[in-house]
Amino acid sequence: MRLREIMRLVEAGGETAGKKEVAQTSLKKAIKYFTKQMDKLGMDLYEEIPNFDKNYKKLRKLVKNHGEEHRKDMPVVSWRQVKDFQKSLHNGDLDIQNPFNENLLMEINMEGNADKVKAQFKSIKAKDLKPVQAQIYLSKVIKNFKKYGIPHNSHFITTKYMIIDKNNRIIDGHHRWTTVMIADPDIKIDLLKVDLDMEELLPLTKAYGISRGNKQNS
């Protein structure tokens, strides 16, 4: 039985690209951009984020050193679906040995022969995570600031579950992570850590998102 047959048409993620890529935006240009955009929100950049320069340098270094995957090839999983994803991994519902057809849709192993994967919810400091995605946009950080305010410990945006591999590489949730990194890299983020490496987890997570009818990134 293929997930195509039980697909739920749920829209998650699938946003269009933003503006001002981190990897392509120097600190000087980032300061100018954030100052202007936060002024529109009635915020002063350095009053809200005293260590902006230091935080941005650390963020940009991580993105340039580790970001290698194109945004369009990244998975789209709603944070509301992460617990279901964990349950599927724990129950062995996902056939990770040969999970994909040509459309990257998973098969559910109805006989219980699929591998079970350990996946635990944890809280990890933003600075201890590594991005996989190359295209990360500052405009989406401003959008998060406008919608949720500046992140702090136990802030709403830090509790929207991300997905990472066993080596702390981010599989889903790059812009939430970026928002926290700019505010304070020492803030802990709630996430699901899966006991697979990126090469195994990335296509599996993408297939899961597609199987749930999630609109993919453009």
Image (cartoon, rainbow, N blue to C red):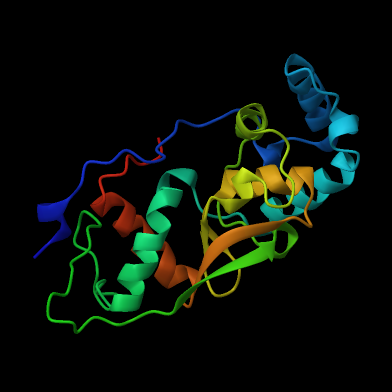
- Pinpoint residue 76: horizontal percent, then vertical percent: 40, 48
Displayed quadrant of residue 19: top right
For the question of whether residue 77 can be seen, the reply is no
Q: In this view, does 189 lie above or below 118?
A: above
Residue at 64% from the left image edge and 36% from the top image edge: 21
Compare residues 152 and 69 and report the one nearer the observer.
Answer: 152
Tell me the quadrant of the picture where the N terminus can be found.
bottom left
Residue at far top of view: 40
Q: In this view, does 107 lie above or below 207?
A: below
> In the image, what residue occupies the spot 86% across and 24% down?
44
Q: In this view, does 62 lie to the left or right of 192?
A: right
| Horizontal and vertical percent position of residue 94 | 26, 71
**Location of residue 23 with respect to 120 vertically, above or below:** above
- Could you tell whether 59 is left or right of 178 in the image? right
Side of 72 relative to 121 (left or right): left
Q: Quadrant of the C terminus?
A: top left
Image point (36%, 63%), residue name: 85
Q: How many marks?
A: 0
Q: Is residue 160 visible?
A: yes
Quadrant assignment, res 189: bottom right
Residue 209 screen position, x and y as percent: 33, 52
* Relative image position of residue 2 (x, y in whole percent): 12, 62
Dividing the picture into quadrants, the one containing residue 148 is top right
